[in-house]
Image: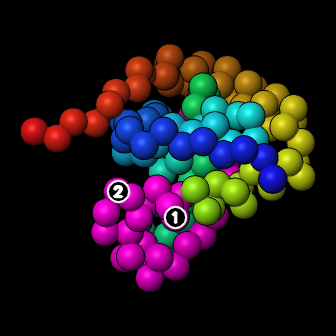
Amino acid sequence: MSEVVIDPQEYYVWLACENGWNRAVGFKAKIAGIDCSVVMVPFDPIEIVFSDLNSGSRILSLPISILDMIMCDTKEKMLVLMKENAGLAAKKIGYSGIDLVREESRKAKGSFEKKFGPMPDFEKTSVY
């Protein structure tokens, strides 16, 4: 299995969506050699979304159960769940081909920046 590294620092990451750049709270990760953002989407369908960190484009999403989501009542539990799912994501990325995923993300970045302007900068989340 490819190495999975998730930075435990929470960040505001940017996801490329139909309506522009959407900010979400998530984590930065390196999965199968690709820099990704990892975000839990808590509404139907409940899923963990893996997006390319440089383009904001979705690489893949994995559904999770509502019970899994409810059990993530701490950051540590969330990181464990995300790391487990990141292992599955690494396998799927490996099957698709890392070079293909990178090329699709590169093309998507150009398209998104043409439509919405440059991606905003990432920010660490803060607790005040």
Residue 34, x across and y down, in percent = 70, 34
Does residue 62 appear to the left or right of 116 in the view shown? right
Choose top left, top right, bottom left or bottom right for residue 110. top right
Q: Is residue 1 visible?
A: yes
Report helix, strand or loop for mark 1: helix
Residue bounds of the magenta highlight: 56-82
Residue 84, x across and y down, in percent = 61, 62
Q: Quadrant of the C terminus?
A: top left
**Residue name at image x 54 percent, y 43 percent:** 6
Residue 107, above or below 16: above
Residue 53, above or below 41: above
Label 2 crowd bin: few (<14), some (14–19), many (20+), radius 10 Å: few
Residue marked by disc 1: 81
**Residue name at image x 70 percent, y 57 percent:** 87
Report helix, strand or loop for mark 2: helix
Q: Check residue 66 for magenta coloring.
A: yes
Residue marked by disc 2: 75
**Residue name at image x 65 percent, y 25 percent:** 109
Choose top left, top right, bottom left or bottom right for residue 21. top left
The residue closer to the viewer here, 107 or 42, is 42
Does residue 26 appear to the left or right of 65 in the view shown? left
Residue 101, x across and y down, in percent = 80, 38
